[in-house]
Image: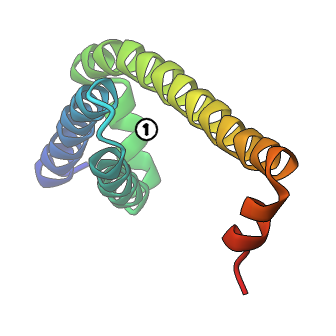
Amino acid sequence: MSADVMAELHRLWQLYLTLSQELLKFIDRQDIDEFLALVEQREQVVQAMQAQPAESMAAWRRTPECAALLREIKPLEMQTIYKAKAWLNKSRRNTAQVHAYELTAGRLNPLGNIVNRKY
């Protein structure tokens, strides 16, 4: 296995770690647009990793450097998934509440419901 491939894998995994850290920052700030942009960037990094030869990736995964990076990445991944799910649930609840008020408003004032209809 060449040193260039190992260096590229190290660079890609380091970039993956950096993007994972940034994802956590943006989900904490509730900046979902930037969060989704970073998710796309991280997906491109994953695709670049998958494009590497399988034997090189297997050799890289056995190195202490990779083990150290994985120990850093795993908790970040778990926190990001937890916070993203919490945000999604909150967003769904808010949407359901908005729709509930729309239905209630129609029952309380039928005239307002006619005016608010979209034609």
Classify 79 as above or below 8: above
Classify 113 as above or below 4: below
The answer to whether 104 appears left or right of 101 in the picture is right
The answer to whether 42 appears left or right of 118 in the picture is left
Q: Which residue is mark 1?
A: 58
Residue 20 position within the rendered picture, expressed as x and y whole percent measured from the top left? 29, 32
Classify 26 as above or below 5: above
Report the residue at 34% width, 60% height from top.
44
For this orientation, the residue located farthest to the bottom is: 119
Q: How many marks?
A: 1
Check the image and tell me how it is coloured.
rainbow
Give 50 or 4, whichever is nearer the viewer.
50
Give 32 or 17, whichever is nearer the viewer.
32
**Regarding mark 1 in the picture, which secondary structure is present there?**
helix
Residue 101 position within the rendered picture, expressed as x and y whole percent measured from the top left? 71, 41
Give the amino acid type for the residue marked by disc 1 in the picture.
Ala
Give 36 or 71, whichever is nearer the viewer.
36
Q: Residues within 10 Å of mark 1 (few under 14, many from 20)?
A: few
Report the residue at 50% width, 29% height from top.
87
Quarter of image, res 58: top left
Residue 3 position within the rendered picture, expressed as x and y whole percent measured from the top left? 12, 47
Quarter of image, res 50: bottom left
Residue 97 position within the rendered picture, expressed as x and y whole percent measured from the top left? 68, 35
Report the residue at 27% width, 39% height from top.
16
Quarter containing the C terminus: bottom right
Report the residue at 37% width, 24% height from top.
62
